[in-house]
Amino acid sequence: MNTTTRRRALTGTALALAVSTVLTACGGEDSSSDAEAKTEDTASASPAAAVKDPLVATFDGGLYILDGETLKLGKTIELAGFNRVNPAGDEDHVIVSTDSGFRVLDATGQALTDIAYQGAKPGHVVRHAGKTVLFTDGTGEVNVFDPADLGAGKKPETRTYTSAEAHHGVAIELANGELLSTLGTEEKRTGALVLDKNNKEIDRNEKCPGVHGEAAAQNEAIAVGCEDGVLIYKDGEFTKIDAPDDYGRIGNQAGSDASPVLLGDYKTDPEAELERPTRISLIDTEKKKLRLVDLGTSYSFRSLARGPEGEALVLGTDGAIRVIDPASGKIEKKIPVVAEWQEPLDWQQARPTLFVRGTTAYVSEPGEKALHAVDLATGKKITSVTLPESTNELSGVVAGH
């Protein structure tokens, strides 16, 4: 879920430091300097100095923790396997999906904690209404907790629910305590159900083939994607919004509390080894209508985000971020950030990734081992940094939460 955040102003001193960081990185300094100390995969590693509004980027073999203002590389944590990262929902922590389950990283303190949710194939991490929800695909288990409790250093009090069958799913807890969770098996996914505070089923809808992904819009309209549109849950009722094509898959979505319109991808070829779509979907959860917008470029599942005023943001393979008015579908501006790129066939392979926090867009450029910070208001780069290795996923804490 997108959380309304504020961007802390970049002071003249910080900007000077940012420029210095770029020059140092471009000069090819050794990444094993004191400021870029490495730690092994252990929760007991000695704590490092706190990092301001940290970002976390994954690379093959570990995690980079960076200062959110200057992009200065802090600590490198070695962590084997294919790891994924998501905001935990507070100012300090990030959820890391590892081979063995979800682990909690104290990004501000630059150390993995002892808090873990074990289980095969850890999947979606969702933040909404002050709660964080983890879905473990290999077990079908859902864990819900208040991210504010992570600061105590021990596993928070957790609500749990286990799906009837394990599947690649997602869940979200609403402000009133209802829990929406997907339905499916390893072979087939069909829709979603809703549970009350006591995990008693109160509603379900199984008219959402291939259900995947979720997002929340203004006034708590919750959407999950289908292979033929989207399924909306709002005010205690499910509503299906059909795609204009028989096969119109909306598998990835981005929502904003500032807009009733959701941003989604849009694919129409069920036989493609990898479809590189050039259209995105805008789903109006109030009018129950779906609009398609042609971008003139393709994009990937790591290209979608929302701006501070609800703007729809898409990072295209032409290297530019498109800023789209979600109400009209008009592309208001294009912000060039990285070089032209192509989405790899394997979804686990690195590609430019967009992460937005407040008015700052962070964009990785794996081909150059680079990371850029862009001011969405002006369209200008704030700073850039070159890292020791190419990065894959990119995330961070919720600044000013």
Image: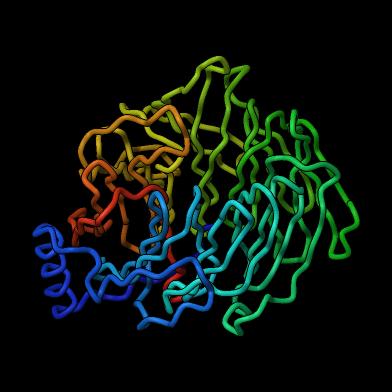
Measured from the top left, where is residue 8 in percent x and y? 31, 75
Check the image and name the residue furthest to the top: 271
Residue 100 x %, y %:
63, 55
Q: Is residue 382 left or right of residue 279?
A: left
The residue closer to the viewer here, 359 or 338, is 338
Task: Tell me where residue 394 appears, x and y as whole percent.
Answer: 40, 54
Q: Nearer the viewer, residue 252 or 387?
A: 387
Location of the N terminus (image quadrant)? bottom right
Q: Would residue 2 appear left or right of 319 to someone viewing this image? A: right
> Quadrant of residue 66 in the image?
bottom left
- How is colour applied across the structure in the image? rainbow
Residue pictured at 15% horizontal, 61% vertical: 25
Question: How far across and down, in percent of the image, does residue 99 sit?
Answer: 59, 51
Relative side of 373 to 141, left or right: left
Left or right: 395 as drawn, with respect to 390: right
**Vertically, is 28 above or below 289?**
below
User: How many numbered marks have been drawn onto this rendered protein structure?
Assistant: 0
* Residue drawn where x is 27% and y is 46% of the image: 365
Asked whether 379 or 397 is in front, the reply is 397
Q: In terms of image quadrants, where is residue 334?
A: top left
Q: Residue at x 34, y 77 (%)?
A: 52
Residue located at (31% from left, 26% from top): 296
In this rendering, the answer to whether 370 lies above or below 69 is above
Q: Residue furthest front?
A: 40
